[in-house]
Image: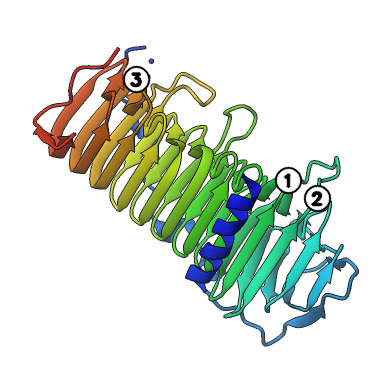
Amino acid sequence: MKKYILALFTATVLLCGCGKGSSDTSQVSEESSDSVFSSRDLSQTADTSSAETLELKGEDIEITKDGVYIITGQTTGASIIVNASPTDKVQLVLEGISIENESKPAIKVLSADKCFITTTEKENKLTLSDNFDASGEAAVIYSKTDLVINGLGTLNVESKTGNGISCDDDLKITGGNVNVVSFLDGIEVKDEFLLNDGNINIISQKDGIHCEKNNGEKGSLKVFNGSLDIEATKNGIRTATSAIFEDGNINIKAGEGVESTLIDIKGGNLTIEAEEDGLNAGNKSVGTTTPNIDISGGNVNISVTGEVSDAVDSNGDISISGGNINIDTAFSSFDYAGNATFTGGKLVVNGEELTEIPPSSK
């Protein structure tokens, strides 16, 4: 399996250069990208007029104050450590670097108001080749605070034993090419994962993207735009509270496609190939929110191959009011415990256009 994943990683780099109840959609955020991302989040280049250049030379680089830092060089057994004031913003500009470690993160953000990882037009490679220590920082890139990844270049992240990228707060990706190959989760976020642009490729032996904190207290995903390709052994995307798709191109090949409490598809192109369920809404979060799947736009293509799999499965409600939904399944197209409504859009199941959602399979 590891040889297979590493081969796919190389190819990717070359290409990139259920109880009844009514829907509670009020809990799905209606925020726009303008209210979520700052101008600095969205800028794909850093202001380097006052930047400090730091070269990797085999020892840890520790950054303790606000500023822009250009990182150059190649090294093994060393980390870039950000340990600044909680009010400081730190921007790391990666200038074609390479870090290979055995048991610790390549980039570790312990304290800052926000940390930016910005790639120039060069290729960067961060690798963890052996087992992590017991510190809990089991990722190639680990951040305790808000993290933004953007830029014009490529960031290759490979973890042979742990997660690719882990963030204990919010993670935003607004540009660049990000390729992750991981033994555990490709991207793990405790609060919210927000994608606005960029090309994200994930190959994972666990979940592609996993968003969860304190067994469901938090953990959400929102895709405003961008390209997201996931190949995962378990879940393509698993979040505790919500998974919202405004636009973008999302391709998932996994054991299960998208799993959350609330799944809201408003636009974009979403293609899922799954062995189990394609879309699965269940009680993943803390509280009494009724699980719900809402499709109001976009192009949704779901293919499921399992003998007892459901293309669309909700432990609560399902609502389709728009979009083009195409389902290919050998077992069940829809399974729901609550209400299922179809008021608009185009629904095709195994080549046949339907005018209503079929009865639940269970």
Q: Residue at x 87, y 62 (%)?
A: 77
- Contact (Cβ within 8 Å) of mark 3 with mark 2: no
Q: Residues within 10 Å of mark 2 (few under 14, many from 20)?
A: some
Q: Residue at x 36, y 20 (%)?
A: 308
- Contact (Cβ within 8 Å) of mark 1 with mark 2: yes
Q: Residue at x 65, y 48 (%)?
A: 2
- Spatial CA span between label 3 and label 2: 43 Å
Corner quadrant of residue 216: top right
Corner quadrant of residue 321: top left
Q: Residues within 10 Å of mark 1 (few under 14, many from 20)?
A: many
Up-down relation of residue 330 to residue 231 (above or below): above
- Spatial CA span between label 1 and label 2: 6 Å
Q: Residue at x 33, y 54 (%)?
A: 247
Q: Which mark is residue 161?
A: 1
Q: Amino acid at mark 1?
A: Thr
Q: Amino acid at mark 3?
A: Gly
Q: Amino acid at mark 2?
A: Asp
Up-down relation of residue 116 to residue 131 (above or below): below
Q: Which mark is residue 316?
A: 3
Determine whether, in the image, residue 288 is placed left or right of residue 305: right
Q: Which mark is residue 130?
A: 2
| Coordinates of residue 86 in the picture (x, y in percent) | 75, 56
Q: State which quarter of the image contains the N terminus.
A: top right
Determine whether, in the image, residue 92 is placed left or right of residue 360: right
Assign a secondary structure to mark 3.
Answer: loop
| Coordinates of residue 273 in the picture (x, y in percent) | 37, 41
- One can see residue 88 in this view: yes
Determine whether, in the image, residue 29 is placed left or right of residue 153: left
Q: Earlier in the sequence, mark 3 or mark 2?
A: 2
